[in-house]
Amino acid sequence: MANPETAQRMRELVDGLNRAADAYYNGQGELMSDYEWDAQFDELKRLEEETGVVLEDSPTQKVSEDQIAGQREAHEFAALSLAKTKQPAELVKWAEGRPIWISWKLDGLTLVVTYDGGKLTKVVTRGNGHEGTNITHLSRAIEGIPQRIPYSGHVVIRGEAVISYDDFNQFLMETDSDFANPRNLASGSLSLKDVNEVKTRHIQWIPFTLVYIENDIPTWGARMDWLQQQGMKSVEHECIEHPTLENVNQSIDRWTEKVTSRQNPFPVDGLVICYDDTAYAQTGSVTGHHATRAGYAFKWQDEAAQTELEEVEWSCAASTISPVAIFRPVELEGTTVRRASLCNISECERLGMGGPGTRLSVIKANKIIPKVIKVEQTVGDFVIPTHCPVCGSETEVTTSESGTRSLHCTNDACPAKQLKKFARFVSKEALDIDGISEQTLSKFINQGWISEYADIMDLGKYALQIAALEGFGEKSARNLMQAIEQARTVEAQKLMYGLSIPLCGIDVCKRLLAAYPFRELMEKAATVEDPAFFSHIPNIGPEKSSAVVGWFRQEANYKATEHLLERLHLQESRQEAAGQLCEGLTFVVTGDVHHFKNRKELQTYIESQGGKVTGSVSNATHYLINNDVQSTSTKNQKARELNIPILSEEDFIERFMRKEENADTSTPPTADTNTPPQRPASEPLMGDLFGAF
């Protein structure tokens, strides 16, 4: 029995954990950090063990439930959660000396996918583990879920629907949305009805368990291989044949390094181990909502440190002015940390944030992200600024549907609202200016040095100030100036992509510039009466054409582009059709190539001969190119169903290349030979300030 104080505390813990879980699993933002969740969950579990009392709605006894809207459907096999630990020794004890596999604990939404007779029959969210929401209608919008597989029996597979950090950041930039993290975006996306809208979110499904197959595949490793053979890309995994504390620790260290060095593109919140022997794994019992031998989750032990707040810095980025805690430096996970995002006003109020001198506990969540987890002692008042730190305009506090309070600048033209666009402008896919991260751009914007794209090319005038900034110095500033100079010569396609014109991804930019040189495209877009003017270009259509026309018609955008062009040497890379050997034909290219340097070069050749290359086989496809003609891959199967010829590379060369072209398959772009613009005399190079490069 629990005394009244303990019973009240257990009730508080259950209610708080359930509210946080509901928000986390249903795209409503974060009500508490993982660190706080784990601490409170462990406290609740300890109190339950001490008192023998378990409340009916305790999170220790149920699977956290996603509530995706739609038709509910019972699972054929219960999708239970895994027991968790932060101690490698417990993993070793659980392994019992048997061979185990270690893989990512992906931070997304679990989807259960079923096939019958080689055809996809349903996709269901995990829900509460016993029933979920049928979202089969969205399956074509989720990358990684084949519509058909070679195997003709009954198959049930579990996998995680995730969004990469890059795709998440790109989505935020293009839509100015306020999703807290990739998982929130994935969750919100699966509630949408529009398949095309979901497709723009780039959700990827990564299988992690082959739940059922009619054939006997006795090991987990062989089951992952089988998934690969069916055309699926299973979760990254590694085998530990003889799990001892030493080699388990070594394995965890390797996977941790992948996280801290950002080698993994997807969000994760730990690791999973499972038995290789699948028959043995099924012999465990079910305790609470865990199958004891189905697997074990490992979560990193966050290292916490106490420090003192020096100031709350308000950083204006995109549409939000975000509070950042600046504190006395502390050592965490082998690095020195002195700042952490406070997210929004609601988070500051929840923590009880004060002014300078406030005592804080901080961690690096999942080994990466500095985070304030607790205010130990509040000193002074938490002050919300009334004016934007960048442009000086008045601010306003808004409250979202989920109740989150955040601060915004009321000036639509505030330069800080363009941060994501400036980040795209300097990215590798655009001008490729090495040494300018999003954080660096934010600093420059808040200093008042950047308000349009051209200002990035003029940063040389602030060389001395940049060298004096924290984290820079003369060498870093000099390298940055060199990178800017190198970026002045840029391909038109990269420039156009870097402008962040709505709906203009790399492929759209390439198609537009294959039809018009950049300056002509710009002039036509700004002056034509018909918004659908460019829709005659293959795969552009009225919507994308209208986006381009609308963007250049805005005087501010047109002038900003003119200013930028004055500082650049533009290389046009129009690909005029060099021949007609592929004219009017649509190809799909898959698998490895041997005669061309890569598939991109093969695509370039096809387009130079008047053809088109798409990513998927359909009724509009004329030929599938795959060196493994007899493959049972999804694309090959689809081609056979539609009676589409499958060509090897040799077949393609024989049919669609002249003999004199076979020796050289490349089609180099032609470059604009205009003289590069002269840098204004008032804009010094770093070499002028610190000596020659």
Image: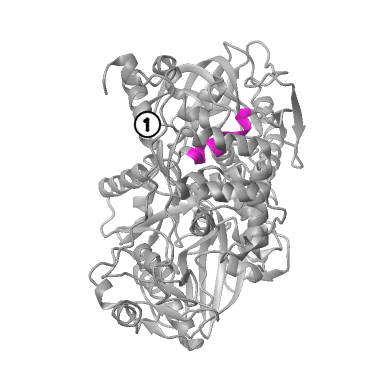
Quarter of the figure with residue 556: top right
Q: Does residue 64 appear in the picture of this structure?
A: no
Quarter of the figure with residue 562: top right
Of 325 and 597, which appears nearest the observer? 597
- Magenta region, residue range: 415-425
Residue 304 falls left or right of residue 59: left
Of 30 and 471, which appears nearest the observer? 471
Residue 590 falls left or right of residue 44: left
Above or below, comparing residue 488 to residue 65 in the picture: above
Q: Which quadrant is the C terminus positioned in?
A: top left
Query: Which residue corresponds to the image point at 46% horizontal and 29% vertical from the top-left?
Result: 457
- Quickly name the residue at label 1: 485
Q: Main secondary structure of the magenta part?
A: helix
Residue 488 falls left or right of residue 557: left
Magenta stretch holds residue 105:
no
Q: Residue furthest front?
A: 674
Q: Does residue 407 appear in the picture of this structure?
A: yes
Query: Which residue corresponds to the image point at 73% horizontal and 68% vertical from the top-left?
Result: 71
Q: Which residue type carries mark 1?
A: Glu
Query: Which residue corresponds to the image point at 49% horizontal and 33% vertical from the top-left?
Result: 566
Above or below, comparing residue 648 to residue 492 in the picture: below
Magenta stretch holds residue 424:
yes
Q: Residue furthest left?
A: 663
Q: Residue 585, image x and y in percent? A: 47, 77
Above or below, comparing residue 168 to residue 77 in the picture: above
Q: Which quadrant is the N terminus positioned in?
A: top right
Q: Residue 22, image x and y in percent? A: 68, 48
Query: Which residue corresponds to the image point at 34% horizontal and 14% vertical from the top-left?
Result: 689
Q: Residue 486, image x and y in percent? A: 35, 35
Q: Residue 137, image x and y in percent? A: 66, 70
Q: Secondary structure at mark 1?
A: helix
Residue 550 falls left or right of residue 211: right
